[in-house]
Image (cartoon, helix red, strand yellow):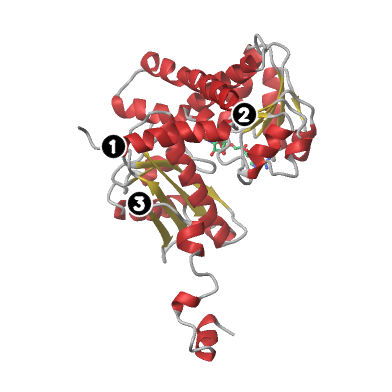
Amino acid sequence: MTRQAAFEHEPHKGMNQLPHKGVLMNELFRGEQMVCCHDRDTGLRAVIAVDDTRLGPAVGGVRMKAYPSELAAITEAQRLAAGMTLKNAAAGLPFGGGKSVILADDALRTQDRTQVLRAFGRFVGRLGGSYIPGVDMGTTVGDLAVVGTVAPRVACAESDPSPWTALGVHTGIRAAIAHLGGSDLHGVRVAIQGAGHVGAELARLLAVDGAHVIVADVDPARAQLVAARTGGEAVAADRITSAGCDVFAPCAVAKVVDTTTAGSLGCRVLAGAANDQLADRQTAAALADAGVLYVPDFLINAGGVVQIYASMQGWDDDRLRPEVLAIGDRVAAVLDSARHDSVSPLLAAEALASRRLTESQAVPA
Ligand code: NAI
């Protein structure tokens, strides 16, 4: 029976009495605007989520991947967009938070990529500049350049922010180890999930510090290449969480830890580039109970978005570098504040972002 037919059989049930009342607008999406896009010519299906524009236009990457369902894609866009709001606010940037996902199903993969990206760019254009897309998993600088031929403004069309994201994560890991009393990264075992743009560069930086790198990727050749270049070891993708490490650095997919796996990670620090690493808020408490110091993803992985701001400002690398290295100072301050107030680092980092968002609302005297 279709939903319409169900209403007809229960005429007393108006729209307000739908069993899913409030799920979409109140629970699934608490942001400002969410757009579901469909292009008839290419078959493109995409979701653009604008979470918050109080600090400026919503900046956030375009993720292109296969999703098990449309609901999964919508949920991910919303969660990632909300994470971008926190990230941009905590980093002190004049950007709001947004994110988009392109549902890369088998049918879409047969389409001309340029046409798909141009179709996506047209939908971005309809938002009138309130969303500025950048790169994310599954998209490249070249892809954003194509989107930018149609959309009013894009980030990352000229340079890849990933090395700066890796530098920020690297300095954040150093700060976390120092917080636990370590003097440097020499001999520290770091397990990196994902040997892509960020993971590979993070591995290089860690190896320079004398850390022992363990790396995994669903594409084993990528992991082996990174391991060979860094003198580290490659393990199978499903073995990375049990590889035995001091620091686990997720640099691939979202929701890598939940309340049941938090206790079995066996590391001292969870700190990586991947957005939205925790399955839910309870996982932050489970990690603390398990003695794992969690460095909130939106705090430590802001290097890329700082680089986006820098390129808009025309800064050179010498001007940008200290701004990215300041992520290490912010991580140290948040971890100290969490310890002082006996709260999780997640709460302390959210408080930092929230203060900035609230200050932006303050009416000048
Ligand atoms: P990428 O697409 O270059 O690399 C991701 C790598 O992870 C790929 O090699 C892929 O094969 C691998 N992978 C996918 N699923 C995996 C799994 N289950 N286990 C192991 N490996 C898996 O992506 P990129 O740019 O390196 O980003 C990595 C993460 O960092 C993403 O979550 C992204 O949202 C986040 N991030 C990236 C930024 C950037 O500047 N590139 C900025 C901030 C966050």
Q: Within the displayed image, which quadrant is ligand 1 positioned in?
A: top right
Who's the residue at 45% across and 77% down the image?
15
* Quarter of the figure with the C terminus: top left
Q: Is residue 171 left or right of residue 324?
A: right
Residue 236 appears in the rendering: no
Residue ID at (47%, 45%): 82
Label of residue 362 in the image: 1
The kind of secondary structure element at disc 3 is helix
Q: Could one spot residue 265 in this view of the protein?
A: yes
Q: Residue furthest top?
A: 183
Residue 112, compared with residue 9, is above or below; it is above
Quadrant of image for the N terminus:
bottom right
Query: First in sequence: mark 1 or mark 3?
Result: 3
Residue type at the position of mark 2: Ala
For label 3, the crowd category at 10 Å Cα-Cα, with few meaning under 14, some 14 to 19 and many 20 or more, is many
Q: Position of residue 338 (x, y in %)?
A: 57, 27
Element under disc 2: loop
CA gap, disc 3 to disc 2? Answer: 32 Å
User: Observer-nearest residue: 303 or 18?
Assistant: 18
Callout 1: helix, strand or loop? loop
Q: Which residue is mark 2?
A: 271
Percent of width and height locating residue 103: 53, 56
Measuring 44% from the left and 31% from the top, which residue is drawn there? 90
Which residue in the structure is indicated by mark 3?
Answer: 124
Please tell me in which quadrant of the rendered image residue 361 appears: top left
Question: Residue 66's x, y, as percent?
Answer: 59, 54
157 sits to left or right of 271: left
Q: Amino acid at mark 1?
A: Ala
Compared with 329, 33 (above or below) is below
| Mark sitting earlier along the chain (2/1) | 2
Camera-near label (2 vs 1) is: 1
